Each structure stands twice: as structure tokens, then as C-alpha cells.
Image (cartoon, grey):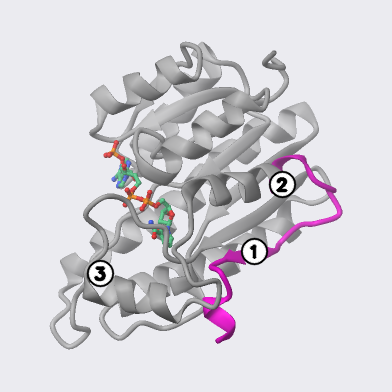
Amino acid sequence: MADPGRRVLVTGAAKRIGRVIAIELSRRGFEVAIHYGQSRREAEEVSRECGGAPIFQANLAEVRQIRRLFSEVRERFGPLRYLVNNAARFTRVDPLEITEEDWDFIHDVNLKATFFCCQEGAKQMKEQGSGRIVNISSLGGVRPWAEHVHYNASKAGVIMMTKGLAKALAPQITVNSVAPGVIPFEGDVDERVQKMIDATPMRRAGRPEEIAETVYFFLTGPDFITGQTLVVDGGLNDR
Ligand SMILES: NC(=O)c1ccc[n+]([C@@H]2O[C@H](COP(=O)([O-])OP(=O)(O)OC[C@H]3O[C@@H](n4cnc5c(N)ncnc54)[C@H](OP(=O)(O)O)[C@@H]3O)[C@@H](O)[C@H]2O)c1
């Protein structure tokens, strides 16, 4: 049974990791709100899998739309106690060729939107006296990749922002981060990704359920844990 106090918004929840996080949280008793950007049909499917969960659209690259999203969530769903910032962009560009547009394309969503979603979510949580935020960062936030320098910087920013917000929002709200390693879906595994999987000490790619499980831990575990990033990568980072 969903607990009405356990209201969580998952951003980018129509597909892939976000979809699995939403479904797993719903299965474990959370009342889930599903955010999507463009994937409406898929968001509706996730809604059905989450027992008719409400869906909300917003282009997170615009702070105005983020503010509208959170106010709609509050009105239609109720004030949030939990937030999972999962939506992100990923591109591969040689750093010598990167343009201002390439840079902003990544940072607008990965870092700026994550910050403003935290800000809006925290306002609703503060009013209720407590809350939990989980930001999905990346192994790329702690380990450099030559053709993803812009992405690395955005995800390293998410990790530091998580620490800063944990200080700023304590003691009512915890802010933690999950940093996935290689979590491939159909069509993702090219030669480069296969090399990373081969180099992973656990000798396999990660599963989205493993990311969802870690998110669940931060949402329900001890509130003495805040500002932390848990890398879920089969040991690849420490190799
Ligand atoms: N998959 C991996 O191997 C991996 C590894 C490390 C880290 N991660 C991180 O884990 C999270 C999920 O990864 P993923 O591979 O499942 O992600 P993804 O498919 O690349 O993106 C997730 C969702 O983000 C939403 N999104 C992107 N830009 C948006 C915008 N401007 N406005 C609104 N929504 C936007 C999209 O929603 P719509 O489709 O509805 O537009 C998309 O479905 C991300 O934070 C990613 O960086 C993933």
C-alpha cells in the first residue's frame, strides 16, 4: 500500500533508469509522480505500471518550467517529501571542438536543472519539516573520460552540489547522490562500452534495478547519512 506521506517525484522517469526507479519505488510503497520531457507515451506506460501515478511534463533546461513543474506537482499530487533528480543529457565531443552550445546543452540539464529542482523540492520539504533528495550523478563525475569532459564537469558539479546542499538543508533534509557505472540498455553497447564492461571487476554491466535499490536506500536509510555519493559500478572506479 502506498503511504500518502511518501510522495516522491522522479525526473526523467519515462525510460531506462528513471523508469525502473519509479517502478521500484512504487512497488516498495512510495506514491510516485512521474516527470517526463518528451516521452509522453512511455511516461503513460510507467504511470500504468505504478498504479495510475500522475505524470508531469517540463523541459528542465528552462528554470521557468522547473518552477511551473513543482507548483503543478504540489497542486495535483501534494507537497513533496522525496525527490529523485535523474534526468540528464549525455553527449560525446572532442574537448577541442566543443562549442558553447555543446557545453550549455549538457550543463543546462545535468547541473543547472538539478540545482533548481533541489531548490524547489527543498522548499516543499522544509514546510513539512523533513525530506530526502537523491541526485543521480555518474562514475563520470569521479573519473575522467577524454571525450566527455563537459559531461564529467557537470556530474562532478552534481557531486559537490550534493555536499553543499546537504550542509545547507540539514538537519531537516538529507541530500545524497548515486553515481552509476555502466548501466546499458538495448543498443548502448559499442566497442568502447564493451571495454568498460570487460574492465569491471564484477565482470558484468550494472542493472537499473541496482541503481533503484541504492536510491531506495538513501530515501529510507539512516538520516545521519547526508552529502554522500555512492558509486555503483561493480568496482570499475577503484581499478
Ligand atoms: N545509463 C548509464 O550507463 C548511466 C551511467 C552513468 C550515469 N547515468 C545517469 O543516470 C541517469 C539516468 O540515465 P539514463 O541512461 O537512463 O538517462 P537518459 O535515458 O539519457 O535520460 C533520462 C531522461 O532524462 C530526460 N531529460 C533529458 N533532458 C531533459 C530536459 N531538457 N527536460 C526534461 N527531461 C529531460 C529524458 O526524458 P524524455 O525522454 O521524457 O525527454 C530522458 O528520458 C542520468 O542522470 C545519467 O546521467 C547513467
Q: Compare marks 3 and 2 and give the one earlier in the sequence.
A: 3
On whether residue 151 falls in the magenta region, the answer is no
Residue holding disc 1: 230
Residue holding disc 2: 217
User: Left or right: where does residue 95 sit relative to residue 227?
Assistant: left
Question: Is residue 137 shown above or below 198?
Answer: above
Image disc number at residue 103: 3
The residues colored magenta run 218-239
User: Left or right: where does residue 80 sit relative to residue 114?
Assistant: right
User: Left or right: where does residue 145 sit relative to residue 80?
Assistant: left
Amino acid type, callout 3? Trp
Image disc number at residue 94: none
Q: Tell me the quarter of the picture where residue 12 sits.
A: top left
Furthest-front residue in this view = 203
Image quarter hosting the N terminus: top right
Amino acid type, callout 2? Phe
At x 46%, y 47%, the residue is 86
